[in-house]
Image (cartoon, helix red, strand yellow):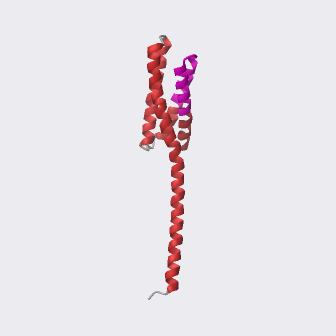
Amino acid sequence: MLERRAVLTSGTAFLAAGAASQAMASDRSTHSMAKAMPMKDCIELCTASHVMCLETANHVASTVRSAASAQLIALLNDCAEICQSTANSMIRSSALHPILCRACAEACERCARECERQSGDQQLAVCAAACRRCASSCREMGAMGD
């Protein structure tokens, strides 16, 4: 027969071990959530930039007639593609997503600069702002992979 003290002692030890295990799991969960939130935000910004770049490329194709417009359209399409690929890599939890995030940040910065050079066009200004937000978030996500 077990002594009452042995049962109580083992029960207390069991509760303490359970509480410690729960605290560790909670800490890991909080860390995972902290990492997941910026990633979720980055995915959303990449997706928004993807859509904005495609819409802006269509806008430029239908309104701007210059030699530079073909280059701008190509840049907008390239930026849209890298944004989509980067978002997809984060959704899949790809090990390569930090590399893609850094590339996306660079592409979005270039796209924003070119859009800003075309002063007076509201669509291009909105696109530049979307690309800058995406670039900032992607730089943060890319740095997390280091």
Residue beneath the point at 54% across and 71% down: 16
Given the current orientation, which residue lies at the most extreme top position? Answer: 66
User: For the point 53% across and 43% down, which residue is it?
Assistant: 38
Pick whichever, 40 or 77, lies toward us. Answer: 40
Determine if the magenta segment contains residue 98.
Answer: no
Quarter placement of the N terminus: bottom left
* Residue furthest out toward the front: 122
**Image location of residue 144, percent across then percent down:** 54, 44
Question: In the rendered image, which quarter contains the C terminus?
Answer: top right
* Front residue (pair 58, 97): 58
- Residue depicted at 52% across the width and 45% down the height: 37
Where residue 92 appears, as percent x and y from the top left, is 41, 43
Which residues are drawn in magenta? 106-134
Left or right: where 31 falls relative to 91: right
- The residue at 46%/30% (across/down) is 50
**So how many labels did they put on this image?**
0
Decide: is 82 above or below 6: above
Please tell me whether the stretch drawn in magenta is mainly helix, strand or loop.
helix
Using the image, determine if residue 118 lies above or below residue 38. Answer: above
For residue 77, what is the image quadrant? top left
Q: Nearer the viewer, residue 144 or 57?
A: 57
- Position in image of residue 7 (x %, y %): 49, 82
| Residue most extreme to the bottom | 1
The answer to whether residue 146 of the structure is visible from this angle is: no
Q: Is residue 45 visible?
A: yes
Give the x, y percent position of residue 130.
53, 29
Q: Is residue 121 magenta?
A: yes
Quarter of the figure with residue 27: bottom right
